[in-house]
Amino acid sequence: MRSFLPVSLVSLCLGFLVLGAGHALAGSMPAGTTELSTALAFNHAGFSFEDEDLGSTTTLALSVGVGQCVTNMLEIQGALMFAHNSVSPEGGDSESASSFGFLGSLIVNFSTSGPMVPYVQGGIGLQTYSGDGYEGAETSSIVPSVGGGLRFLIGDSASINAGLTYQHVNNAGGGEDITANEVLFTVGVSVLL
């Protein structure tokens, strides 16, 4: 599988700008902080078997979440997820479909002396499908979803986030009894209230 992540270069450049600017005195997510976040993930995969091209899939996913820091380290977050998938089999017609779902997560934010806040997270979720590629699709369950990354704080009111997430998906793509293991690179922005 090949993943093309042009967004990662932009996020790294922005991260270095934030680090260089050093606006935040300390990297932390204090108790009582509410986080409004958005994240974007992109994946393109080409498939082959015994040197025969089988086609490709492209996924663009967006999530919008709300989190609440219950302690200086622990955050509870709920996120709505939307993804658009395109499947292009070799020699066949392309199909596209959309999925919509919810992911609940527990996040541990680690305090630092600089403007970076490392984090780890774990969660579970559900996804439903619609579109010409998903007639009769089953609801997918995402168990577990685990990952981690870095928040680059901008003052005390915003952050730029970059991370990696592993997800085990049952009924992947809406197909009954099909499982998938996905690794996603995500970039996003959070507003901290």
Image (cartoon, rainbow, N blue to C red):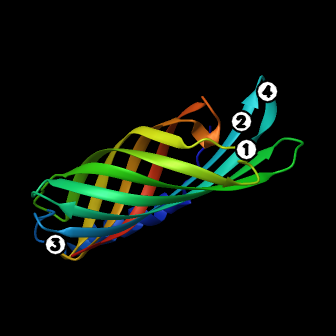
CB within 8 Å, label 4 to label 2: no
Q: Quadrant of the N terminus?
A: top right
Q: Amino acid at mark 3?
A: Ala
Question: Which residue is at the far top?
Answer: 50
Residue 108 vertical placement versus 161 (above, below): above
CB within 8 Å, label 4 to label 3: no
Q: Secondary structure at mark 1?
A: strand
Give the CA distance from mark 1 to mark 4: 14 Å
Indicate the quadrant where residue 75 lies.
bottom left
Q: Quadrant of the C terminus?
A: bottom left
Q: Which residue is mark 3?
A: 24
Residue 161 location (% of width, % of height) = 34, 62
Give the CA distance from mark 1 to mark 3: 43 Å
Q: Which residue is mark 1?
A: 56
Q: Amino acid at mark 1?
A: Ser
Give the CA distance from mark 4 to mark 2: 10 Å
Which tag, 1 or 3, sits closer to the chain's start?
A: 3
Q: Which residue is mark 4?
A: 51
Q: Amino acid at mark 4?
A: Asp
Q: Which residue is mark 2?
A: 47
Residue 65 location (% of width, % of height) = 36, 64
CB within 8 Å, label 1 to label 4: no
